[in-house]
């Protein structure tokens, strides 16, 4: 299970209420707003603390309810993202704002983003001419996640404009979902070509744009917040459990081969030494988590899909089917084919 800051719950409901007024409808009644907060499992009268988290499935359910709301609920994700400001994110936002250039801001999102959410996190991909802030794909394909990824891209554009004085415009933005019937809200916010049905969710900009100084960038203040956020990460208590977070990071890249400890540490924003220390404190071994991730994914693929055994081997990070089959039999006492037959008979 993942998590997201309560800030996004408040922003989502505010955006829906504003969208309702813009479309000529009445603002949301207090009872309706409280019902929406109830879906997320929070009390709307509580202080808005960026460090307080809600479970991702609750947030997805909220976004899916908003999607079906009268007045263009599917426009709400971009409205949420467009409304985000650095100060909404606490210390994380101040680190983004004080970075000396936009590239530094984006690298802080890549490194520290999970302080505010474990979903819709970014990776910075730099090519020869273009750089992309790509949303790391989630494993759960549902409308709520699609909308959350759209929030992330829209927010990244809004924050980039804030720190650069408003002159930032992406080369393009890309979304995996199909174009909405009315994309006027998206066009008004992004002000650049929008590519739908793309292979990723991302904003793309010229590489040289990353080197342009930020309006309020300050090297010493930026270093201070880096140290502060490193401390937060070191003591960060993931709501889903630290071992679960590590397994999720492993699962995200298994099809590319089992990741090393150093690679996984980089994905979750900490050093190899810190990752080893955190796992040791929980009496866990990294290689055991790799095995758990592989075994769980293999069992899911064998029982719920028609993938060929060679494809299952590839998706679980094995170089060939025979190596996968030997490992699976060692885990479960039966072959992958035998496990699949037993799963199908149990249906």
Image: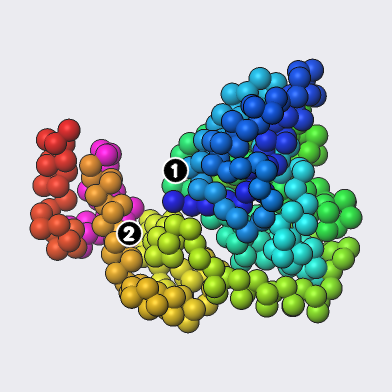
Residue 45 in picture, x, y percent from top left:
67, 43
Q: Which residue is drawn at 54% across and 36% down?
A: 39
Asked if residue 208 can be seen in this view, the reply is no
Q: Which colour assignment does the render follow? A: rainbow
Query: How many neighbours does mark 1 have within 10 angstroms: few (below 14), some (14-19), or many (20 or more)?
Result: few
Residue numbers of the magenta segment: 304-326
Residue 302 lies, in percent from the top left, at 23, 45
Q: Residue at x 16, y 50 (%)?
A: 336
Magenta: main secondary structure equals helix
Give the mark nearest the N terminus, 2 or 1: 1
Residue shown at the point (85%, 58%) measured from the top left? 164
Pointer 2 local density, CA inside 10 Å: few below 14, some 14–19, many at least 20: many
Q: Can residue 223 be seen in this view?
A: yes
Q: Mark on residue 206?
A: none
Residue placed most toward the observer, 255 or 273:
273
Q: Name the residue under label 1.
A: 140
Residue 293 circle label: 2
Determine whether 285 is above or below 290 in the image: below
In this picture, is 201 found above or below 72? below
Element on which disc 2 rests = helix
**Local secondary structure at mark 1:** loop
Q: Where is residue 308 in the image (x, y as percent from the top left)?
A: 24, 44
Would you say 28 lies left or right of 331 here? right
Name above or below for residue 204 compared with residue 93: above
């Amino acid at each position: 299970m993942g998590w997201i800051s309560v800030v996004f719950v408040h922003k989502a409901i505010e955006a829906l209420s504003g969208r309702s007024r813009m479309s000529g409808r009445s603002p949301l009644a207090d009872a309706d707003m409280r019902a929406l907060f109830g879906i997320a499992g929070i009390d709307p009268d509580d202080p808005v603390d960026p460090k307080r988290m809600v479970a991702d499935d609750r947030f997805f359910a909220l976004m899916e309810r908003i999607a079906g709301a009268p007045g263009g609920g599917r426009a709400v994700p971009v409205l949420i993202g467009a409304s985000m400001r650095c100060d909404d994110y606490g210390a994380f936002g101040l680190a983004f704002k004080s970075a000396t250039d936009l590239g530094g801001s984006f690298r802080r999102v890549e490194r520290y983003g999970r302080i505010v959410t474990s979903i819709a996190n970014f990776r910075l991909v730099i090519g020869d001419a273009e750089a992309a802030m790509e949303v790391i794909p989630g494993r759960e394909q549902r409308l709520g996640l699609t909308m959350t990824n759209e929030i992330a891209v829209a927010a990244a554009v809004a924050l980039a404009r804030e720190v650069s004085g408003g002159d930032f415009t992406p080369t393009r933005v890309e979304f995996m979902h199909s174009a909405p019937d009315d994309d006027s809200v998206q066009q008004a916010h992004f002000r650049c070509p929008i590519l739908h049905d793309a292979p990723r969710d991302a904003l793309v900009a010229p590489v040289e744009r990353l080197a342009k100084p930020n309006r309020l960038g300050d090297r010493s203040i930026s270093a201070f917040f880096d140290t502060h956020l490193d401390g937060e990460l070191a003591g960060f208590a993931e709501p889903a459990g630290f071992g679960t977070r590590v397994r999720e990071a492993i699962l995200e890249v298994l099809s590319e081969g089992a990741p090393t400890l150093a690679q996984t540490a980089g994905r979750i924003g900490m050093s190899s030494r810190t990752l080893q220390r955190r796992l040791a404190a929980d009496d866990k071994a990294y290689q055991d988590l790799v095995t758990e991730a592989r075994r769980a994914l293999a069992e899911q693929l064998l029982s719920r899909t028609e993938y060929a055994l060679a494809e299952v081997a590839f998706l679980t990070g094995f170089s060939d089917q025979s190596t996968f089959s030997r490992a699976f039999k060692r885990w479960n006492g039966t072959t992958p084919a035998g496990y699949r037959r037993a799963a199908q008979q149990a249906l």
